[in-house]
Amino acid sequence: MNLTEFVDQYRVKTNREPKLDDCAGEIIPGKQFCTDMPDRPEYRSHIYDGFDNGRLGLCLMYMGARKWNAAQRHMVTAGFLPRQVGDTEGCYTFDPANVSQVKLAMKLAGIKHAQMRSPAQIKAATDALAKARAKTAQPPQGDGVSGLHSDAA
């Protein structure tokens, strides 16, 4: 499974398609836990592709070892495979067909789901928008005076 299929299947909130990092690799950026790093997609925790066995990678970067160690325990328990492990950051691979691994990966990286609306919600929103547009398109009522009168007359 590639990242585009992953985005479609799991309704990942992203700008239509995965972003590119400095190496021109596609990633799905998550939350930036390391605030001392530059604000670029590759310095955020992210999900990436590039494995020939159908697995996806999860890169996590934290400020402290405590959060990283807790995340590692969760990933090992869920069946993630380590690729690169550091003191406060590292990369693990996971199976995108395993829903529990996907949920954990998205939670740890801070990646959000896209909101899916029902047809009734879409209709209600479009009706409300049409009503608001019709209301603003009407000319103002009255003589155009603000309602303040002077007692000079």
Image (cartoon, rainbow, N blue to C red):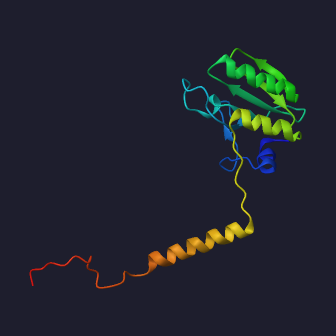
Where is residue 75 shown, x and y percent of the image?
81, 27
Which quadrant does the N terminus fall into?
top right
Name the outermost residue toward the top.
87
Q: Is residue 25 left or right of residue 41?
A: right
At 77% across and 19% down in the image, what residue appears?
Answer: 84
Q: Is residue 142 left or right of residue 15?
A: left
Residue 121 quadrant = bottom right
In-image side of 110 versus 36 (left or right):
right
Residue at figure coordinates x 69%, y 47% from the top left: 13
Q: Is residue 75 left or right of residue 67?
A: right
Q: Nearer the viewer, residue 10 or 70?
A: 70
Query: In the picture, which quadrant includes the C terminus?
Result: bottom left
Instruction: Tell me residue 99's x, y (percent).
Output: 86, 41
**Is 124 in front, or is 134?**
124
- Name the residue rendered at 54%, 28% in the picture: 38
Q: Residue furthest left?
A: 152
102 is higher (above) or lower (below) than 116: above
Q: How many marks?
A: 0
